[in-house]
Amino acid sequence: MTTEDSEFLQHEPCPKCHSSNNLARYTDGHAYCFGCEYYEPGDKSIERDEAPRERKDLGLIAIGEPTDWPSRGITLESAKKWGFTRSELGGQVVRIFNYRNAHQQVAAQKVRFQKKDFRFLGDTGEVGLYGMHLWKNGGKRIVITEGEIDAISVSQAQGHKWPVVSVPTGAKGAKKTLRKNLEWLNQFEEVVLMFDMDEPGQEAVKECYDLFVPGRCKVASLPEGFKDANDMLKAGKVKEIVDAIWQAKVVRPDGIVNGADMFDLVNTEDDLISQSLPFVGLQTMMRGVRLGELITLTAGSGIGKSAVVREIAYHLLSLGETVGMMMLEENTKRTALGLMGLAANKPLHIDRSGVTEEEFKGAFDTTLGTGRLFLYDHFGSTEIENLLNKVRYLAKGCGARFIVIDHLSIVISGQEDGDERRMIDNAMTALKALAMECNVCIFLISHLKRPSGDKGHEQGAETALAQLRGSHAIAQLSDFVIGLERNQQNVNTITYNGKTYTINNVTTLRILKNRFTGETGPAGWLLFDKETGRLFELMEDPTEKKDGGGGSSFDDDDDGDAPF
């Protein structure tokens, strides 16, 4: 077997420069280090079956050797830095852009034929942006180009000192690729888009800069007569490439408008994107919920806040919405089983007995299996900045329009800074800004401080805005504040559909703030059924004493005053 016939097997540590994976081993036994150029001759035959099993069926070709590309202005140094090589496929000489995965393994290859035809080989779903493996996570600035050769050109112009990556599928797939890698890109303070100056490239710029925090994304413009960065490199315009990066500008307008120009805007009916709520009382007083709103639910400990937001999330999911849930006091399995339990009308997180495999799978398919539910596996990490980045990713990267955060207090209590009021102010400001920036509706749970007097919330004390724990910013920045009340000490009973319930299983919903319609006050009563794990709405207050005794009963006929 000759060196030319050999195929790439795997990456290994280099015995000379001691890098962990720069040494490439081939099927004829020879090895080459792309870091220090160490070379081992092929003195033994290695069978192809000895390659790692998970790399065996990728359909990759031999990586080949790094080589310069004079007609493109690419130097040998750049080829070695980027792992840009020349090889052979189907009897033709080809150039290869090697894409590496998180383990620094070549997982995909973009092969360029002499007539500018391209072919992707390997597992393209395993890799991200071209060149990601070259740079550490985060930093001052990163440049994104439309093609691999442009990324190498920009990197060469900067002496390979500053991060540059490219999208693998050109302008058409740029937004999808950047969205997929948004969490990694958001670690950089500044993102510069240097796409082609043609119409498709500039259209892609308009699509992509909306993915980023306002002010973070900038757009680089190239001088007239040059389509892309490689055109400039070929023309010797190295300084101009660097200048274009430094002179990149924020495309977003500053948002200042002249009131005299607003007649057409104010004369147009608003097309509010709203969605319904699962409870009639809240729906009637709030007129549903809208994107851009921050809705806070608050109650004392153990009142059932999480149960209410689970019902809301399940309702939205059943309406075809994409929902993100960040339940910080429970793991993802508990959250998942809780939602599945709503679909099955059975508290699956407690007991699966009586539920068939078919019913269990059906509950999964209608909740998690939709592909429209995203959960946050927090691993105990609840830092505010990390949480905010995840909210943005759920909105921009996953397409979630409704996001639940349970709860604010655990985020604040986990911070080293002891100034709780200031931290809540900052968190609420950021969450409201995120709701508006990302055009999502955020449901936030917050705790109450104990009311004055002897009667606590667990004894049915009425909720109030003044009792929100820690900061006035919660009330000020929320579009709605909904208080939950339940007298956990009340053992009086009510009867519904032939079943007896205690009053401590009934939760009162009270709207404390309503920025949309202004209506506040009691908005309904929810009955918790332990057997089904579900909340059912009552249309009248069951705690009010009825004639004839201390208990209450509700009809189950269709006369308009029964629970539903």
Image (tube, rainbow, N blue to C red):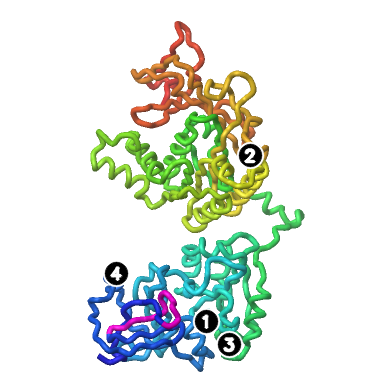
Residue drawn at the location 49% of the way across and 26% of the way down: 507
Instruction: Using the rendered image of the protein, determine whether residue 228 is visible from the camera's viewpoint.
Output: no
Q: Separation of disc 4 and disc 1 at Cα?
A: 29 Å
Mark closer to the chain start, 4 or 2: 4
**Residue 540 x/y as whole percent:** 49, 21
In this view, the mark in front (4 or 3): 4
Q: Alpha-carbon neighbours of circle 4 within 10 Å: few (<14), some, or many (≥20)?
A: few
Q: Of helix, strand and loop, which one carries label 4? A: helix
Q: Of helix, strand and loop, which one carries label 1? A: helix
Q: Of helix, strand and loop, which one carries label 2? A: helix
Q: Separation of disc 4 and disc 3 at Cα?
A: 39 Å
Q: Separation of disc 2 and disc 1 at Cα?
A: 48 Å
In this view, the mark in front (4 or 2): 4
Q: Of helix, strand and loop, which one carries label 3? A: helix
Q: Alpha-carbon neighbours of circle 3 within 10 Å: few (<14), some, or many (≥20)?
A: many
The secondary structure that most of the magenta stretch takes on is loop
**Location of mark 3 (residue):** 233
Q: Which residues are magenta?
A: 16-27
Residue drawn at the location 52% of the way across and 53% of the way down: 390
Numbered badge on residue 236: none
**Location of mark 2 (residue):** 474
**Residue 327 x/y as whole percent:** 47, 43
Amino acid type of the residue tagged 1 in the rendering:
Ile
**Location of mark 1 (residue):** 152
Whether residue 103 sits left or right of residue 409 in the image: it is left
The quarter of the picture where residue 155 lies is bottom right
Amino acid type of the residue tagged 4 in the rendering:
Glu
Indicate the quadrant containing the C terminus: top left, top right, bottom left or bottom right.
Answer: top left
- The answer to whether mark 4 and mark 1 are in CB contact below 8 A is no
**Location of mark 4 (residue):** 54
